Image (cartoon, helix red, strand yellow):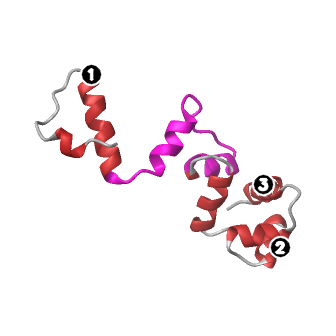
Amino acid sequence: MDQQSRQRLAQKVRALRDNTSQVEFAKTMGVRQSTIASWEKATNVPTLENIEKLAELSKQLPEEFLANIYGRTISTQECPTVAFAITTMDNQEIGCILMLIGQHFGGELPDDIEEKKLD
C-alpha cells in the first residue's frame, strides 16, 4: 500500500474512532491499542478481516472502503442499504430473493416454492 493510501486509511481510522479512546476502539475491533496507534500513524495496515470490520463500521462494503482508501470510487450509492444487506444474507435467503426477482420479471417459480419462501 502506497503512503498516500496509508495516510487515507489512518484518517479513516481516526474518523471512525471519533471521540472514543484508542483502548475502547481497540476493544471494539478486537485488537490491541498499539495496533490502532500503528494504523493511525500509518506505520501498519489492518488485516483483511479488520478491513471488513472497519468497512462495516463505516457502513460500506469492504470493496467501497478499500476503493476510497486507494483514492478510487465504486458506486453502490443508489442502493447502499440493499448492497450491505445482501452481504449479510445466507445462500438460502439470496436464492429466495433471486427467485422472486425472476418471478417479477416474468419467470415462473418452481412448484415447491412454498417450502423455500422466507417468513
Instruction: Residue 4: give x, y in percent of width and height.
Output: 77, 54
Q: Which residue is label 2 attached to?
A: 23
Dot 3: few (<14), some (14–19), or many (≥20) neighbours within 10 Å?
A: some
- Asked whether residue 106 is drawn in magenta, I would say no
Q: What residue is drawn where x is 67% and y is 62%? A: 1
Q: Earlier in the sequence, mark 2 or mark 3?
A: 3
Marks 2 and 3 close (CB-CB < 8 Å):
no
Quarter of the rendering containing residue 117: top left
Q: Residue furthest left?
A: 111
Query: What's the amino acid at mark 2?
Result: Val
Rendered image: mark on residue 105 = 1
For the residue marked with disc 1, what is the amino acid? Phe
Mark 2 to mark 3 CA distance (whole Å) = 14 Å
Dot 1: element: loop
Magenta part of the protein: which range? 63-91
The residue that mark 3 highlights is 16
Q: Give the Cα separation between the discs numbered 1 and 2.
A: 51 Å
Q: Is residue 83 left or right of residue 112?
A: right
Q: Mark 1 or mark 3, which is nearer the start of the sequence?
A: 3
Query: Do the residues under discs 1 and 2 have CB atoms within 8 angstroms?
Result: no
Q: Nearer the viewer, residue 73 or 29?
A: 29
Left or right for 81, reference 96: right
Relative to 89, does residue 103 appear above or below in the rendering?
above
Instruction: Look at 15% across and 27% down and name the residue there.
Output: 108
Instruction: Tell me what residue is drawn at x 21 percent, y 21 percent.
Output: 106
- Badge 1, how many Cα within 10 Å: few under 14, some, many 20+? few
Placement of the C terminus among the 4 image quadrants: top left
Query: SS class of the residue under badge 3?
Result: helix
> x, y (%) of residue 111?
10, 36
Residue that protrudes farthest toward the top in the picture: 106
